Amino acid sequence: MSSTLKDVTYNRSEAVHDTGWWRQAVVYQIYPRSFADSNGDGIGDLRGIISRIPYLAALGVDAIWLSPFYPSALADGGYDVDDYRDVDAKLGTLDDFDDMAAILHAHGIKLIVDIVPNHTSNRHVWFQEALAAPAGSPARERYIFRDGTGPDGAQPPSDWHSSFGGPAWTRVADGQWYLHLFAPEQPDLNWDNPEVRADFIKTIRFWADRGADGFRVDVAHGLAKDLREPLPAWRTLDEELLLRGAHPFTDRDEVHDIYAEWRRVFDEYDPPRSSVAEAWVHPSRRSRYASATSLGQVFNFDLVELTWNPVSYRRVIVDSLADAAAAGSSNTWVLSNHDVVRHASRYGLLSEAASHEGRVVSRQWVQSGGTTPAYDSELGLRRARAASLLMLALPGSAYLYQGEELGLPEVPNIPDEHRQDPTFFRNSGVDKGRDGCRVPIPWTGDGPSFGFGTGTAHLPQPEWFAAHSVQAQEADPESTLLLYRRGLRWRRRLQTTEELPWLDAGSPSVLHFARKGGWQCITNFGPEPVPLPAGTVMISSAPLVDGALPSDTTAWILATAERSADSMR
Ligand code: NOJ
Ligand code: CA
């Protein structure tokens, strides 16, 4: 290793000492039912994940986050949990979980599990007890039951909508109604109830004791509620309430009292368990979840909203870093996850949409079955690769979604009879749902499910998945998979303090910034090639053209070293 490179080599014990491992971690999200199927029943499982740990280690991720693997009837892809302290029999056993945790740890990979505290499933023992018990009983007090309005209480207690469409209240046999901000199979818990609070502490300890290094907290903004009568009308639930923390069920200030209690539990462990909030809140209130006395880190989905636009990208980066720093946390970067259209497809949509409408347009495209707006898959992949390399150069942690390292596009035209997402069933004709990013991963170019398992996959995979398989990409030095592997190796080696000075790129279409130690990142969003700064090009998302950075391309430069990129391949 040359002395210059040594100067900038990331010193893990200094920059990411154990207690802060999450600050700049690369976290790979696994949607367990669609990752790898070990027994050919078409459903991904924990043994399947175990079989792919060498793949994750070779990719170079620091941690994995598992979407729910708990017993569930899958009314919402597993976010309807029957039992928080078990593994779904179709996915494996607690012993499999223990093996998985141990093998991940042996590979130096941390494990984040998903906690779903806003709602249980309707099959949870508590909800079954509540249904069997009378109005006003302690069993009903764990949830949010109310009498209806109108003659005979036949109207719901309020006119609120659920997030998946349809009313937020469902009536039970004795005439009472229960609240569900999501599907009817996901009754909301009552977080004023001490038993609910105590049970989640038990769940946190259960998984932390079994080796979970951190937690992703689902619907973190939803737990605290003010449901004093009269319940306000839906049309009055406006932004002004949100900004004041006075909305009846979203982002109330008291929610942080719950997390302060969790934090005390996380801090009993060595190293302390980390957590990241999934909080869909006004950007000005997001950092509350990232405070050291709350969950410590919060998802920032701003990049998911954007089209491929340098001005918006720069604004989001500047604002996000400032917000995270003000909270004493690091930012989280997300381009794809199990709820949004994959970014390789979002960036291929030929639309004139405003720069903040990237997510909205991509949903419309899925709704049209992938026909409108027009789609250029090559352009999408080219921009996705540039975006990923840009994201991976930013200070903070990067959350990758399974398959994005393959540049995998969305499947926009799943036949309706195969759809699983409640968004589709509850919004007929309006939203086709999120199944298109949850199609099982292609590992090989052939076989009944492209190497996902020995049977057919639980969601149909299109023929074109073959070309994106891990097997095909491992054989192609220019593949997206190898780009991610090289990028993550360089990132690990060059990782440094969390500052980001911007450099003058000479054009508003070019974003150019430095990281301490000579690492620079430059992205050309414009149509014409631009000259590169002095230094060695370590990696680029597309080949250079006569030594210049072409359109829709990102390159990382080592400004002080003379080392060639080849040595890292
Ligand atoms: C957020 C999860 O990411 C999503 O998949 C789920 O549908 C909702 N929370 C409800 O739990
Ligand atoms: Ca299976």
Image (cartoon, rainbow, N blue to C red):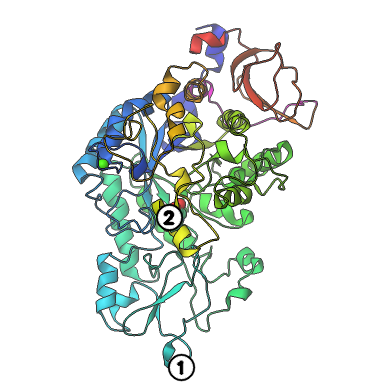
Nearer to the camera, 161 or 248: 161
Look at label 1 and name its amino acid.
Answer: Pro
Look at label 2 and name its amino acid.
Answer: Asp
Whether residue 514 appears in this view of the structure is no
Tag 2 secondary structure: loop
Q: Position of residue 210 (x, y in %)?
A: 25, 43
Q: Which residues are magenta?
A: 489-506
Residue drawn at x 58%, y 70% as measured from the top left: 246
Tag 1 secondary structure: helix
Residue drawn at x 42%, y 92% as measured from the top left: 152
Q: Is residue 110 left or right of residue 293?
A: left
Per the picture, the main secondary structure of the magenta-coloured stretch is: loop
- Give the mark, 1 or 2, whose residue is nearer the N terminus: 1
Nearer to the camera, 224 or 465: 465
Q: Which mark is residue 184?
A: none
Disc 2 crowd, CA 10 A, few/some/many (<14, 14-19, 20+): many
Residue drawn at x 70%, y 45% as measured from the top left: 355
Q: Which residue is mark 2?
A: 421
Nearer to the camera, 149 or 280: 149
Q: Position of residue 354 (x, y in %)?
A: 72, 48
Whether 43 is drawn above or below 136: the answer is: above
Q: Which residue is mark 1?
A: 151
Whether residue 444 appears in this view of the structure is yes
